Image (tube, helix red, strand yellow):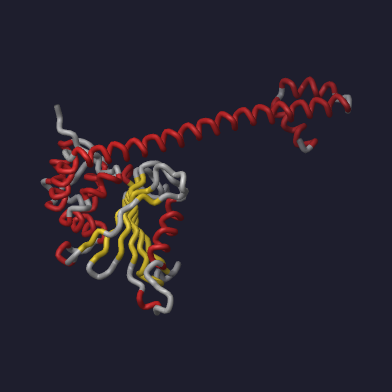
Amino acid sequence: MSQFLMKPKIDFAFKEIMMNENARIGFLSAVLKIKPEDIKETKILNTYLQKEHEEDKQGILDVRILLNDDTEIDIEIQLAELKVWADRSLFYISKMYTGQIQQGQKYNVFKKCVSISILDFILFTDTKEYYSCFHIMEDTRHTILTDKMEFHVLELPKLPEDIKENSSNLELWARFISSERKEEFEMLATKNPYIESAYEQLQLISQDKQKRLEYEAREKAIRDYNQMMFEAEERGIERGVELGVELGVERINKLNTILLQNKRYADLERATNDKNFQQQLMSEYGI
């Protein structure tokens, strides 16, 4: 029987992988494009389920990391499509930013806040690139207003099909996160020593009975949530069709009544067989 391995893109597994400092440094180095040796220290802050509402069963599990220069980083994974993700990211990084200052303090206390979003859906349809980085800057001169807020987005479905010899460390990490098979993990581990540490951590947590129970519970919560959203959407589509049919019948009946009242019998007969003429009459009567 093959060895069980958690999927790194399940946020519980990713959080546990990030508990390994070597893996943490390697991942941040790849995303932030800084040398691993320039990261002197990283510290895991609180990792918890953010809930939009009290009754929310799924929540968002984020990983907060503090660098040695006091840069605060929030890493989140989202599997199901969420079109308002950009607004959501801005909201949470703003809370993280304003949370640094206390009453009476000066504005120079603010440190850089970084948002890293790992998405298993396509957010930006205007590009095929799997990685995007955003800053707050002037439209034409591209002068950065402030570097205190920074957004990194990884869209896993856009990853290239094949790994090349010159694949970046960021691409290797993105592939590691999206991988599910032992062969893929082992191959990626040979290409980057920090990913090798991440794979070793993945093997450890996957064999921990308690962590496996937590992982399976988390995976089930995400699966149940996605199924619930899918069924709600299906019900919405069905009801929309029903309402459309009801509205269509109501409009046709109204048109027929008007034509009869105006004794336009020939037009009534023609409208029964000619849909374009029917629509023309509806426009004429403002139906």
Q: Looking at the picture, how far across and down is residue 83, in whole percent?
A: 45, 47
Against 271, residue 3 (above or below) is below
Q: Residue at x 88, y 28 (%)?
A: 262
Q: Residue drawn 15% across and 56% down?
A: 22
Q: Which quarter of the figure is the N terminus placed in?
A: top left
Residue 75 position within the rendered picture, expressed as x and y whole percent measured from the top left: 31, 54
Residue 103: quadrant of the picture: bottom left
Residue 7 spot, x, y in % from top left? 25, 40
Q: Is residue 196 left or right of residue 91?
A: left
Q: Is residue 281 above or below residue 142?
A: above
Asked whether residue 129 appears in the rendered view, the answer is no
Q: Position of residue 92 (x, y in %)?
A: 41, 58
* Nearer-the-camera pick, 37 or 18: 18
Q: Is residue 111 visible?
A: yes
Query: In which image quadrant can residue 277 be found?
Result: top right
Q: Quadrant of the C terminus?
A: top right
Q: Identify the residue at image location x=74%, y=27%.
A: 252
The front one of 31 and 108 is 108
